[in-house]
Image (tube, rainbow, N blue to C red):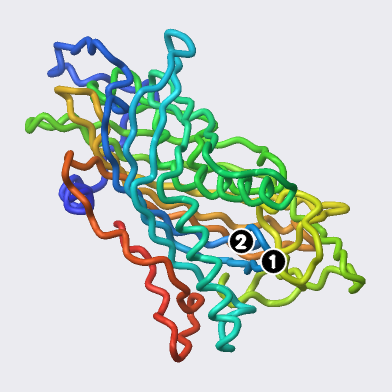
Amino acid sequence: MIALLAMSLGTAEAQDDKAKVNSSVQEIIVYSDDFARWDKTRWYVVNELILPIPVAFARDFNWSFASYAFQMRAILSCEQASILSKKRIEVDCTIEDVGILASTQRRQKGEADRKLVAAVLEEVDSKMTGLKVQLQTDFKGGLQNIDIEGLKTSNVRQRAIQETLRQILLRVMSGFHLRIPDHAQRDGKYVEKTSALMQMPSTTASQGSSRLVHQVTVRKDGLQVVQSLGEGTTRITIPVPRFTNGRAGATTFSQSPVNQGSGTQVSGDIADVEEIEGPVLIGLNGGQEAGVEANYDLKASSVAIFERATGIMTERIWTVQGVPTASSGGGGNRLGNYQSVGRVQILGKDARPDVGPSLQVSAPRQNLEGLPPWKPLETF
C-alpha cells in the first residue's frame, strides 16, 4: 500500500527550509495518549541486513556460523509497561513468531555444514519465539534503546549471544523510530538529527551524525504521509580476532561476494575457538585484542503513514545504504557496503501473516544447488 501511495504522491515540490505550514490545516487534535502506538498493538516487521563484517549466530554449546546477509520476519505484540517520565515510557514487545533466512559463505556447500547451520537456526528461532523485547520510547516517536529479557545467560558465551541478538533487534526495530511533531498532523518539512535508523551494528556504539528531512503531506482521506530523505556519517569498530585454540590470530582480508565484490572477511569462525572471550556482535571470533575504525557515508529514504484520528504511525518502509570512505580500513576498498531495508505494519487483533521458516539460503548472487536462492526485499 505504501508503494502505491508513494508513486501517487510523486516528488514533493520544493519548500522553504523554514517548514511552511499548510494554511488549510486549522485544527490540531490533542491526543490523550502520545504513546497510543504501544497500547496493546500488534506489528508485522520485516528487515534485510547486508553487513560489511558478519554477525555470528550461535547455539549455547559448540556450534555457530557467520552471516554477512540475512532477513528476519517477526510478529510483535506490544503494550505499555512503565512510565519513566512525562515524555518517556518503557514498552514490552513479545515476539509471537519469527522467521530467519540466513546466508553464510563458509558453511554452505557440505552436507555437514548445512546441518550445523540448520541446528543453529532452529535454536535461535526457539530462543526468539516468545522473547520479550523492552523498548524505551519518547512521546515524539523516538526509539532510544532496547533490551531483551528471558534469555538464560549463565556464562560468557550466553551473554555474548544475548548481546548479538540485541544488536540485531536494534536494527530490526529501528523502523519504529520517527520523531515528528504533533504526530504528523501538519503539512510541512521537519528536520530530525541522529536517527536510530541511521546507525550500524558495531562491537562498540556507532558514532557519527545524521540528518533526516521529513516532508509531511496531509491527505483528505484522514491519512498523513511522511516522506523522508537523509544522509550522515558513522564510525564503527572492526574487531581483530584472537584465536584460543592455538591457531594463528592473524586477520586476513579477502573479497566478499555479499558486497558486490568488495568486503572484509576475517578468517575463522567462533566454532573454531574453544571459548568466547568477548561479546560476539559482528565478527567471527569472540575475543578481540584491537579494532580498526571504519567510517561510512550513509543515505536513507523512507515513507510512513499516520492516522490523523489516532496519531498512530500504521506503516513504514525504509532503506539505508552505507559506503565506506576512502580512509577506512586500509583505504576503504577492502570493506563491504552496508544495507538495511525493512517494513513495519500494524496488524489487527487476529491477523497472523506467515513469517516463514528459519532456514539457510544462498548468499546474494550465489545460487547453490540444494539451497533456496537469495531474494532481496522489494519495498519501494
Image mark for residue 62:
1
In the rendered image of this protein, does residue 146 appear above or below residue 58?
Answer: above
Nearest the viewer among 211 and 61 is 61
In this view, which residue lies farthest toward the bottom? 369
Identify residue type, mark 1: Asn
Which residue is drawn at the image coordinates 62% and 61% (left, top)?
58
How far from the left and from the top, in percent, is residue 12? 26, 40
How far from the left and from the top, in percent, is residue 225? 23, 36
Which residue is drawn at the image coordinates 27% and 29% (left, top)?
40
User: Left of 25 or right of it: where is 86?
Assistant: right
In the rendered image of this protein, does residue 109 appear above or below residue 228?
Answer: below
Circle 2: element type: loop
Identify the image quadrant of residue 139.
top left
User: Left of 360 or right of it: where is 243?
Assistant: right
Image mark for residue 59:
2
Which residue is drawn at the image coordinates 46% and 37% (left, top)?
133
Circle 1: element type: loop
Q: CA distance from mark 2 to mark 1?
A: 7 Å
Neighbour tally class for label 2: few under 14, some 14-19, many 20 plus, Cα within 10 Å: many
Which residue is drawn at the image coordinates 58% and 60% (left, top)?
51
Nearest the viewer among 317 and 130 is 130
In this view, which residue lies farthest toward the left? 221
In the rendered image of this protein, does residue 276 appear above or below residue 159?
Answer: below
